[in-house]
Structures are given as C-alpha cells and as structure tokens.
Image: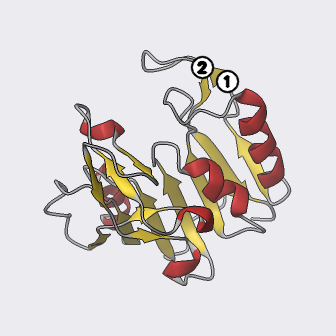
Amino acid sequence: RADLLTKGLVLDAGARGFVFAKWFAERGQEVIALDPSPDVIDPPKFVSHVPAALVSSKCKDNMYLELGPDPNAWYIHGGKGMESVPVKTLTIADLKVAKWDLIKLNIEGSEYDILDEIEGPIARQIVFSFHEHTSRARGREECGRIIDKLAKWYHVCNRVWEKRYGCRENYWDILLVERGI
C-alpha cells in the first residue's frame, strides 16, 4: 500500500466550513483553502485561507459571487446580478505550485473548465464532483469527455453516474490518482 500524501500542499477549493482542510491540516499537511464567500470566518489553525474563488483562465476577470438562500450553493458568474458581490479570483497557475499532493474541488460548476484546462498531472490526487444538479450543468457526455481526458494521466476511481443527495444524476465524488504512484 502506497501513501499517496508526501507532505506536499493540499488545495481545498470551496472550503466552506473547512472540514476537509482541517482534517488534512490535523495530519500535518499544509493546506491552502480557497472560498470567496463573505461569511467565511475563523479558518482552523494551520490552514491558509484565501478569500478568493478558483476559476479557469477563461473566467479570470470581473467575476461575481451569486448569493442566494442556500449559502452552500453560491456560485461564481461573469455578470453582476441583484444578489451578487464582486470576488477575487485565482487560477491554479496563479497559486504557483508545481505539483500538489491533493486538490479538492467543490466549486459549484467552476470545476468543468478548470479540469478541462489541465494539461498533465498537476496533483497526486484530485477529488471532485460535477455540479449537474445546478444551472451550470453540462450533461453526462461533457462530464465523460473531461474525465476521459484526465484518464491519460490519472486512474479514475468511483466513476459512477447516479442520483444522490436528493439531486438528479451526476458523477459524484470522483477520485483521480496519478498514474505511476
């Protein structure tokens, strides 16, 4: 059994609540936690919180956080709406990390373009769900295309299209593990 963590950096994008970030920080991992929500306060000890949204290079400028009744479903978009606030955005390249130990994406639809931009293994592991249950859905075929692209560099674990959490079908909790480790 190989330990997939090397005490390298962990990226928690969509860190609301810091459960994921805290778990890894408590085990000695250095964690960078990104979440643009204005109500995120008090990050756990040993977690570097950056109040920014992770986006693709296509969506870098003039982005807004759409606020709604469910703070766990706020999302980033390019047009100012009645219930939105401007946010700072970062791309994975902006973070200037050559290779992550682990990247977690729970970013309400921004993961499609971010994952599609990857051109090689950027992390030992990547965990994500698509957000097919939101207005940003792209469909099973597009999700599959992105997963297939990433399969060049990663073993794909838990590729199951199913209903969960009272939502419609989706690829939930995909884990990518870099080939060769």
Q: Position of residue 128 (x, y in %)?
A: 56, 46
Q: Which residue is mark 2?
A: 169
Q: Residues within 10 Å of mark 1 (few under 14, many from 20)?
A: few
Residue at the image position 75 percent from the left and 46 percent from the top: 146
Return the disc, 2 or 1, that comes first in the chain's sequence.
1
**Hey, what amino acid is under mark 1?**
Trp
Q: Position of residue 81 (x, y in %)?
A: 32, 45
Q: CA distance from mark 2 to mark 1?
A: 6 Å
Q: Is residue 77 left or right of residue 5?
A: left
Describe the element under mark 1 as helix, strand or loop: strand
Q: Position of residue 24 (x, y in %)?
A: 38, 61
Which dot marks residue 161? 1
Task: Tell me which colouring the rendered structure shows.
Answer: secondary structure
| Location of the C terminus (image quadrant) | bottom right
Q: Position of residue 125 (x, y in %)?
A: 62, 59
Residue 140 position (above or below residue 34): above
Q: Residues within 10 Å of mark 2 (few under 14, many from 20)?
A: some
Describe the element under mark 2 as helix, strand or loop: loop
**Hey, what amino acid is under mark 2?**
Glu
Residue at the image position 33 percent from the left and 52 percent from the top: 65
On the question of residue 20 being in view, the answer is no
